[in-house]
Amino acid sequence: MYTGSCLCGAVRYEIHGDVDRTSLCWCTMCQKQHGAACGPYANVASAALRIVAGAESITRYASSPGVERAFCGVCGANLTWQMADHSDRIAVTLGTFDTPYEGRVAHELHTESKPGWLP
Ligand SMILES: [Zn+2]
Ligand SMILES: [Zn+2]
């Protein structure tokens, strides 16, 4: 099991299942949302993700039709990305994990918009 939380600690979650489908998404929308070079995600079964605290603090934003990004409405930490057409899966931000993820990221998406300012 993996545990995770937002920056302020209001939202806490558990992942009861395997974490193997990990990715870095370099798309410009993830760059905007994360304020960072990419969005790091673990794609897990939706049923495996349990919000154990702070569900009422979660704010959702539809960044494009059928795509919902969820974040803590208190501290702004990005938590999940999900497509309505594939609601059996949900992408959880690796940076909010409290249990260290020991694997290596498996996939990179939208590498064409990788910023030039990376070291
Ligand atoms: Zn928070
Ligand atoms: Zn993206």
Image: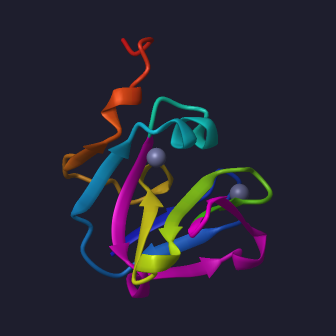
Q: Is residue 42 above or below residue 56?
A: above
In-image side of 62 versus 107 (left or right):
right
Residue 80 is one of the magenta-drawn residues: no
In the rendering, at what x and y percent does residue 72 appear? Answer: 71, 60
Q: Along the horizontal axis of the image, is 29 left or right of 111?
A: right
Q: Using the rendered view, name the quadrant where residue 58 is placed.
A: bottom right
Where is 99 relative to 89, above or below? above
- Above or below 22: residue 29: above
Q: What sort of colour scheme is used for the picture?
A: rainbow
Residue drawn at 72 percent across, 50 percent down = 76
Give the vertical position of 106 relative to 50 (above or below). Answer: above
Whether the magenta-drawn stretch holds residue 46 is answered as: yes
Image coordinates of residue 52 in percent, x first then y, are 59, 81
Point out residue 34 in the picture as x, y percentages from the top left corner.
58, 40
Query: Which image quarter has ligand 1?
Result: bottom right
Residue 73 in the figure: left or right of residue 40:
right
Residue 113 in the image, given as x and y percentages of width and height? 41, 28
Q: Which residues are magenta?
A: 39-67
Specify the quadrant that holds the N terminus.
bottom left
* Residue at screen point 41% across, 78% down: 86
